[in-house]
Each structure stands twice: as structure tokens, then as C-alpha cells.
Amino acid sequence: MIVVLKNNVQEEKRTQLIEWIESQGLRVHVSTGDYQTVLGLLGNTDRIDMELIASMEIVDTVKRISDPFKRCNRKFHPEDTIVDVAGVKVGHGNFCVIAGPCSVESEEQIKEVARAVKTAGAQMLRGGAFKPRTSPYDFQGLKADGLELLKAAREETGLPIVSECMGVTDLALFEDVDVIQIGARNMQNFELLKAVGRLSKPVLLKRGLANTLKEFLMSAEYIMSEGNDRVILCERGIRTFDDYTRNTLDLAAVSMLRELTHLPIIVDPSHATGIARLVPPMALAATASGADGLIIEVHNDPMHALCDGAQSLKPEEFDRLMRRIGRIRDIISES
Amino acid sequence: MIVVLKNNVQEEKRTQLIEWIESQGLRVHVSTGDYQTVLGLLGNTDRIDMELIASMEIVDTVKRISDPFKRCNRKFHPEDTIVDVAGVKVGHGNFCVIAGPCSVESEEQIKEVARAVKTAGAQMLRGGAFKPRTSPYDFQGLKADGLELLKAAREETGLPIVSECMGVTDLALFEDVDVIQIGARNMQNFELLKAVGRLSKPVLLKRGLANTLKEFLMSAEYIMSEGNDRVILCERGIRTFDDYTRNTLDLAAVSMLRELTHLPIIVDPSHATGIARLVPPMALAATASGADGLIIEVHNDPMHALCDGAQSLKPEEFDRLMRRIGRIRDIISES
Amino acid sequence: MIVVLKNNVQEEKRTQLIEWIESQGLRVHVSTGDYQTVLGLLGNTDRIDMELIASMEIVDTVKRISDPFKRCNRKFHPEDTIVDVAGVKVGHGNFCVIAGPCSVESEEQIKEVARAVKTAGAQMLRGGAFKPRTSPYDFQGLKADGLELLKAAREETGLPIVSECMGVTDLALFEDVDVIQIGARNMQNFELLKAVGRLSKPVLLKRGLANTLKEFLMSAEYIMSEGNDRVILCERGIRTFDDYTRNTLDLAAVSMLRELTHLPIIVDPSHATGIARLVPPMALAATASGADGLIIEVHNDPMHALCDGAQSLKPEEFDRLMRRIGRIRDIISES
Amino acid sequence: MIVVLKNNVQEEKRTQLIEWIESQGLRVHVSTGDYQTVLGLLGNTDRIDMELIASMEIVDTVKRISDPFKRCNRKFHPEDTIVDVAGVKVGHGNFCVIAGPCSVESEEQIKEVARAVKTAGAQMLRGGAFKPRTSPYDFQGLKADGLELLKAAREETGLPIVSECMGVTDLALFEDVDVIQIGARNMQNFELLKAVGRLSKPVLLKRGLANTLKEFLMSAEYIMSEGNDRVILCERGIRTFDDYTRNTLDLAAVSMLRELTHLPIIVDPSHATGIARLVPPMALAATASGADGLIIEVHNDPMHALCDGAQSLKPEEFDRLMRRIGRIRDIISES
């Protein structure tokens, strides 16, 4: 951590600050410039309150130079992590498409979609059983019954299943779900992050609507610090002033995350845009940007979907998209 | 709900859409303009997927005209709600200042701060026992012990206590806490909202970092829909591109919320700015804007605070601020 | 335009509002629902102040249903526009890459870069002669001399040249420049928009940092309303809370703009990210998303570039990128 | 400027970087920590491309420690600046309210409003003659005629006049206008900033919709670097995800700017909110936050205003507001 003092600071106040820092168990390296004094803090600065120092009268600015994330940090783990989901690999060149309906609605529906996405080449099946809805009066999902229907679809197709868990109360029901999804609204639900961190099961962690990449990685760190290293990150759009799409897909985040972390990174073009006809171009763009996979909403009958039908592809649209994704992927994976 | 069709829509497709809407249990009022046809949907449109309709080929735009929030809506409950916290009233002209340290650290600390803020005129004591921290390696609060220390401070000063609950697992520990705070990161933790909705205890609900006023009210609605009407809303800054302060305090939200809801609305200038010296001007501004109260961080020794010391006032600064708040409040309450 | 009245509005006030609207030269279609009255305003509503109506006591909400942009609107001009720049076509399947240094620095530099980007396949040469800089103390460009050097490079390579004009004062100097670029900061410099609208020369209009797609199109409309239809739109990143990259590239905007307008749309991955190593993935993503072209910064010696060297590719990196862009483009253009 | 190198950087590459920096005319102070090497750059670092250094392979982070703004910087000019406008003082305790219609519409209108706001206590008259409109088809102002009407109103009331200039072409018409306003959209119209910098006339500079405080100050610096020190800053709301108000008023910016600069800072609650009924609470809040003044839209007949009537107060509302502002101001100025 680097602390830059203001010009013309009194010797006495400077000494006082240095002593206080040392009392926190750190060493201080003082370098005096023509105009300003810079303190370099050495030792474990993780516990130091950077904003407190920044607020001190004699301090101009403070800068943390070491990353607060450790386990998910590529610096300490240069190799790509591959997350294995019942034999399906994600990361380090293993490109994975997860597809399925927003909500599980019936056995017929989920099985039909599962067969369709499998035929088109998807490697996992997604389906919402517990649905986070802004309004308490909206459809909240089939809950436990939905998870059973997902398992039945897995039984028939062999596709591992991915479903969102919204709280610790429901976690026991997910024992036989292959990947637990943590939604954007729960990215900083630390109780839930810690709880899934204690499981030995892959976790698909979605970026929050207004969270920085650092906060995103710190949430992965919450899971990993409890012992679970099988985390898949998912960029799904951020909230901006822009009002044409539901969110703004931040594809540069994929490349930045690639540098910062060894975890696999996938993209959700369906929630990012909220509009079915924007899903194919954004899915192709995400593939070209080097993502490790995609999660896409597919519905056999979007006109009657109970939620988010507006952003779901029909099976034939998904099938056509998959073929183009494959061709883009060929070009990207060569390099 | 109003559905505007595109120009020159085929008669057949129009009929098909109208039939589909009617099959959802609604009536349709068709009005044909010079250029465009507008459908008015009558009946309970809450369950209709607005985005699905918007995504249809023949549809230009869709607009919902009735608010999805009911219980917290001023339209259906024109009178201001007054939340009574152990005799302290909040709302409808009852201005309330909640003060205390970011974290409870020791019996000595919390009691000293409690006495100081009481003397200065605060009506409730705040103190964090469970701390939401971006990093799993940061101090997470004294937890159950912290709540006990808060109760001891209440015992001594008579001030009702406010503390944040971060998840359903810990909720049982809050039985004897006067106001349960739901933090910004948990504003859409629906599991937690429903759980506090089943209690008969005031809830202080903070606005999420990137949530609209409508989403904020829908989260209040989650609590109220379970039976708990004692909700206090708290504006605490939103996330923007701006980088000088931690968040951007959105004071116009106070006035807008006043129109939309009957619930009391308070402001947190400490978390909004993250900088102690900005707290007094923002506290005065919030008071002048017509807020029902403030929640302010006060610490007896900010230099040694374990978290967020940077944004805490010293007792003497708080005392001075309270006197000025009182004078501004006199002017505002006259009108 | 649709005006939704509040519940239980007095008959008298309603009549008064309708008469006022009619006094503005419009007809009003009244439709009375179970709960609310909806007024449909027919005629030329462009001059009506939507926000004034929205602010009236008896009005709940107002919604404009016709687009305020006309000349750039795909509804009134369904065919893609092709902008021809000295024989180089942009739009409707004509993919165009514009490349060159951030700033023109010397004859040697600009000619060397021009030859390199031409060899790699670029169709136009970019180069800044007038530089918009946040600080008045930063390098402001070679100005008129820079334009002369660009022309010399065009002379040698045959590549049409693109350069930014920052104000009407300098416009006369651009007579022999092939494409005038309007930068993001000037997207709503209406004086400049009107002035280039009176020229018969292609204009490359960049989206402002915090402008919606509608505002972007209205700025194109400013140019077109003066008679110049040769406008190329350029998405170059928007400002968000995100702090890892300089801006957030909004690729979904390309697809949305494609629906809204017939004008060609290109993408600037260099300014969007501000980081050279993110330029190739974002250039590939933009190509896959269906953009009509790219504008990319290339410098022969980024270590010594006078501005924005951090985001420039070296010629060999650009060359490699161009080959991959070509392969992605093959896949996209087939569909 | 501080440059932090990555861990385990090769000696050779480090030496190369240091030599390159020295070749730019700077001295380098090397401090070697346990984990990282930190370079302190001494000398005039203003011309150094911080992002270029940040992009180098061996560099971890770069931090500029001296502010790029000089003339407007409080560090170099600790005393508050007072801007004198024809005898009306703004800044350093001189609180100033500027009021008037959005647009000048007729002699009768501007004179009536001028008399009304003078009676209520306003010290200057505002009125738009050149109007920046998103659409080329909207009313663009009475232009030169509007300025003449403003002068007539000044003649009658003695109030100095403030009006927006949108481009250098029109600047000559403003010779006899007391304060030239630079609008938010033109905050980075550097051609215009330099041009008004060459005048000896007060400039009211509005913050751009998505500009940081540093960028805001750099635009003031553009004006001042040309010799004109009479700059009044104006916070008028920023663009965020929030959709209830037109913009989000950022009052903490007033306090932050107070620390960073000696220039007077006023607030525009009318444009910030876009809704007349939110203007009084935001005006009171701005006053309580310590602003040096306000600029408020007042119209004698908002129902017929040609633009922005939705955000204008009626004279009687303004009168009532002024009395409350005065009382809040008394409390603030005592401290």
C-alpha cells in the first residue's frame, strides 16, 4: 500500500502517522520527493482500512498495490482451472454451452427442451425452479417439483443440470443438482456464498448488476475461501443509463477476467439483453471474444412461457445459432 | 397495460394477438389511430409478461400503467405511515436520528458512543454486529456477542437498537433487537425479505446500489406482503461513474418516494459518501430535502475503528451537527 | 402520444386538458377503462412538450409512440444505406476497416503506418490532427500540418483519410479530407453537427459517452436535416461504474441500431477499452456481432506515441488481427 | 507519478524502463519493497502518458499524484474566488440566486418574469435565447432577438443577465450579456471553452452529464488557461441508471469541489430533476449543503412554455421558496 502525503506536512504529524501504521504491525518505507512524501507500507496490509488513512488530514491519496483476492488470482495460480461437471469440462479451451428454459414448467416442457438442446449440441441443461422476481406477486417457480422435473430430464438426456438456488433454506434440495447457480442479485449474499463454499459441487456465479470485476472476484473468493474451488464465473450484463436493452453486456470483462483469474468465464446473452433477437449476435460476439462458454435460454413455446419468454430462443433458432457458434469457436481456438 | 402495434399490421396477426391476450383472462380495448393501433388491456395485468409482448413481431411498444406495488403504494393508502419503535416514532413529521458506530467493538466503546449520541439528541442507537464485507478476509463483526453489547448499551441509555441482519440463519439472534436492518447488498435477497416479513418488528430497508425506486418499493412490498407493515426506507447512495465519493447520494429520491409511498424515508449520509467530512453537509441537505430521519455513523475513536472509520464522525462533531439539523428541521416542519 | 390520466380525475379538469391539447393543433381520442382514462393524441406531436404534460396534476404518465427521428429511421427508409468514400463502400454488407495512429506525428510516421495498415488490408487511414484532450496542457495535435501529412500518406497509399474536426473554426481546413469525424465529446455540439450537415462529405459520428441510442440517432438527424445523408455511426464505449477499462463497449447497441436505422454502424474497440491487448478480442467480437466495420488505432512505435499509445496495436499485431477478422467476417456474411 | 512494477521483474527490463522515463526529462526514485519495486517519477510529469506506462508488460499499476489542474486548484490558491457580475458578488459567502424562464419567448414574458424574480429576491436573470435541443425539429430559441429581449428586461429591472452560448459562431452576439453560460453538452467543447477564455466576462460552466469532477475542473482550467479567471461552476445532475428523475443531482459534488477548487459553485435543481415539484426540496437541500448559489427556472405560464415548462416554478412558488432559502442560508452562513 502506498500513502502519498500532502505538501508541507508538519514533521510531527508525519511521525505520528508512521508510528500509528507501525502499531498496526507493518513496516513503513519513506521516500521524500521534491514536492511530496510517499510512504510505502510493507507487510500484510489486507487488514488496514485504506479509506480511514485516505480520510486523514495530512494524507493526499492512498493506493493499494496488492490484490485482495488470493485463491482466484491468476498471479498465484497461473494455470487455467478446468471445472469438471459430471464429465463435462469447462475452461482452458473446453467450450461449454448450457441451454434450457427460464423456468421449468412441466415434465413435457423440460424434456422436450432438453432433447432439443442436446440435439443442437448443448452440454448442460439449465432450468429455473426457484425464480428471483422483483415482485412478490409474480410466478416464483415450481420449486422442489421443478428440481425433480429437471432430474427427470437429465435422466432421459444425460445432460448435467444447472439451477439457481436463492437462499440457504433451500440448499438441501440441491444435493443432486450438478451445478448450483448463484444469481446476480445474490452475488453479495455472503451467507449463501459461504454455504455453497462448504459444498463439493460446482458453482456458477453470476456477476451482480452493478458490481466491479474486483467485487465479482471477491465473491468467488468467498466461495473458495470455504474450500470449494469449482467456481465458474458468468458475465450477464451490467446496469447503465442505457435503456434500449435490459442490461449492457460487458464483453471486455471476459478478457479482463481472463488476466486476473484462472477460473472459467462464461457469458449469458439472454439476461444481458432481455430480447431474443439480440441473443444470437451477442452469443457470437461472446464466443469471438474468447469466453469459455455460454448460457442461453431456449423455450419450445416462448409465447406461453411463464417468465422471460421475451428473451428465449426457439429450438430451431438455437440449433442454427449453435452451428455458427461452432464455426466461430474453430477460429478462436486455433490461435 | 397499453400495447402499441406497429404500422400496417396484418389484420390476421392483430386478431391472433388479441385472442391470445384474452386467453390470459384480460379484456382488450382497441383504439385505431391514423397511424397506429393501440390496445388497452383491462383486468389484472400483474401476471402478464410485458417483455414477452414487447418482443412480438407486430408490437411496437408496451407500457404498464398500473403500479405493481400495492401495499406500500400511496395511491391505496394516502396517509403517511408512522413506524413506532419502542415508543420512538418515525414518519409523518416525526423526525428521527439513528446514530452509532459502524461496528460494535467492545462494551466500553458501544456504551460510550451510546451515551454520547443520546446526549446529542439521537433517538436510536445503531451498531453493526454482522458486517457485510466485500472480502472474506476482512473483519466480519462480533456477531452474537456484538448484539449482546448493543443490548447492554440500550439497557444503560434507553435507546432502541438497530442492527443489520445478513441472512436467515442469524435471524433468531435478532429477537430482542428493536429494528432489523436489511443492507443494500441484500435489498433483493428475497428469502431474507420474506423472513423478516413474517416477524412483527420494524425493518429498516436500505436501497440497493443500483436499484430503481420501483425495485426498492417492490422489495418493501415483499416484506409487507408477508404481513409486516412496519418498514422504514433508507436512501444510502447509488453507484454511478462518479469516483470522488463512494456512492452518489440521490436526495431527489426522497421526494419522489414521498409521492409514491406512505412509508417513512430516512437518509444515510455516512455510507453514501464514505468520507466523514462530507457527512455534515449531506446530513443538512437531507434534512432540508424533507427526509423523515437520518442514520449517521459516530465513533469515539475513528483512528482505531475496525471498519469504515473513514466515514464516522467524532461525538463532538455529531453534537454540533445535531444542533444545526434541529434548526433546519424547524424551518422544514413549519411548512 | 398517449396520456394516461390519474384515477378519479374531475370531469372539468379532464375537459380543460383536452381543450388545451386541441389548442396545440392535435386531435384527442379518449378511451375510458375500468380504472383509468387514456388519451391518444393524433397529429404532429413532435412539438408537444411531453414533460410538461407529464408534470400536470391530473396526469399519471405520458408515452410518445412515434420516433422523433425521421431521416435516419429505418421505418421510413427500409433499405441499408451505403456510404461511398472515394470508392470505398461502407454498409449493407460492405465491411470496412479504418486504421492508423491516434495522432499524426511526422511524415515518416504516418506514411509508415499507412503502408503497414494498407498491406494488412485496411481500407481507410485514420489519424488525429486536432486532438480533444481533457487537459489544456496536453498535446493538442499538429493541426493543419497534421492534415497535410495525412494527405501525403493518402497520396502514397491511395487510402482515403479520416480525421476529427473539433469545431466550426477549423472546418475549412477539412475540405480535402475524405471523412470528417465528430468525436464523442462533440456528439451534441449542435453548431458543429449543423455545419457538417451542410457539407457534401461523409461524416463519422461517434456516440457520446453517456448518450442513449435515441440521442445518438437524433444527432445523426441534425446532420441529415441539413441535407447531408452520408453519416456513418460509431459505437465507442459508454461510461459506466466499471473501472477496469476506460469505457464499456456496448455491442448490443450495434444490433439495436441496425433495427432502428439504415445507416452503417462501425465499432471503435481502441477507445472503448483504452488497452491494446483488449483490442483484438473486442474487434473480433464486434465483427461477430454484425458491425459494418471497425476503426482501430495502429502505431509503429507505441512506446513513443504522443497520445493514447496505451491502446494502439503494433503493425504486426494488426496484421494478425486482420486475418482473423476476415475469417469471422466470412462466417457472418454468409448468413 | 508512482509506477509499481510487477513481482520478479527482470533487472534488464527494469533498467530499460527507467532509462526511457529519464529520456522523457524526469528523474526516477527507486524504492524496493519485499514484494514489489516502486518507481517515483520526479519533475514535470504532466506530459507523460500514464496509460502508456500502465500498458507496459512489467508494470502493475501507475498512479498520478499531482493534480493536472493548476489555476483552479485550491492548493495553489487557498482563498475563495469571488466573481463579480456587474456588482453582484458570487462566492466566499456571497450567495446568489439566478432565476428566469427556460426560454425567452416575448418581451412581455421576460419582463414579467424578471420583475417577479427580482421582487422575490433573485440577483440575476436567466433566459435561454439559444437552446440546445436533442432534436433538430424542436424549438431552438429566439436567438439574437432573445438576447435583445433579455437586455430590455435588464434595462427595466437592473438584474444582470445570464444566457447560454452554444458555439463560437454566436459568441459576438453575447458582448453585452453579463454572464455567458456554457451548457452541460458543451462542457468539453474545447473550441468554445478556449474562446470564452479569451473574453473578460464571467462564465457559468455547467458540469457535463457524465463527467467526473476532475474533468469538470479541467474544463474550467481550459477557460482559465486562456486568461479568464471569472468562472462559476454549476452542478446540474448527472446521468445514472435511475429513471424517475431526468438526472441525479449530485450534491456531495458541491462539498468535494469546495475542497478541490477556489471557484464558486452553484446548483441547478431545475435541470437536475426536470420536475417542478422537486425543485423546492432540492433547492433547499443545495442551500443546506453549502452551495454558493442556485439557478432556478421560473415561468409566468408554465402551461404554455415553449420548452421545459415541466421544470419551471410559478412566480408565487418561487417567492415562497426564496423565503425558505433565506432562512436556511442564515443557519448555514453562521457556521
Image (spheres, coloured by chain):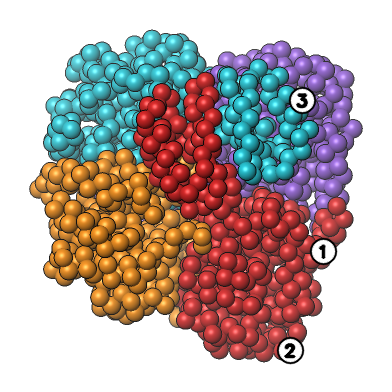
Chain colours: A purple, B cyan, C red, D orange
In three-dimensional space, the C-alpha distance between marks 2 and 3, rounded to whole angstroms, equals 60 Å
Residue on which the image places disc 3: A161
Residue type marked 1: Gly
Residue located beneath label 1 in the image: C326
Q: Secondary structure at mark 2?
A: helix
Q: State the SS at label 1.
A: helix
Can residue D121 be seen here? The reply is no
- In this picture, residue C302 sits left or right of residue D276: right
Dot 3: chain letter: A
Q: Give above or below for C127 relative to A240.
A: below
Residue type for callout 2: Glu
The residue positioned 37% from the left and 59% from the top of the image is D207
Whether residues under marks 1 and 3 lie with C-beta atoms below 8 angstroms apart, the answer is: no
Residue B197 location, quadrant: top left
Query: Residue B308: x and y, percent?
Result: 35, 38
Q: Residue at x 57, y 19 (%)?
A: B44
N-terminal label among 2 and 1: 2
Task: Count neighbours of disc 3 (C-alpha within 10 A) and say few if under 14, some if 14 to 19, many if 20 or more.
Answer: many
Vertical arrangement, residue D50 with respect to residue B131, above or below: below
Residue at 60% over, 85% down: C175
Rendered view: C276 above or below B68: below
Mark 2 and mark 1: span between their CA atoms?
A: 25 Å
Q: Which of the pair C178/B285 is nearer the observer?
A: C178
Residue C280 percent location from the top left of the image: 71, 61
Above or below, comparing residue A256 to residue A120 in the picture: below
Q: Is residue A314 left or right of residue C273?
A: right
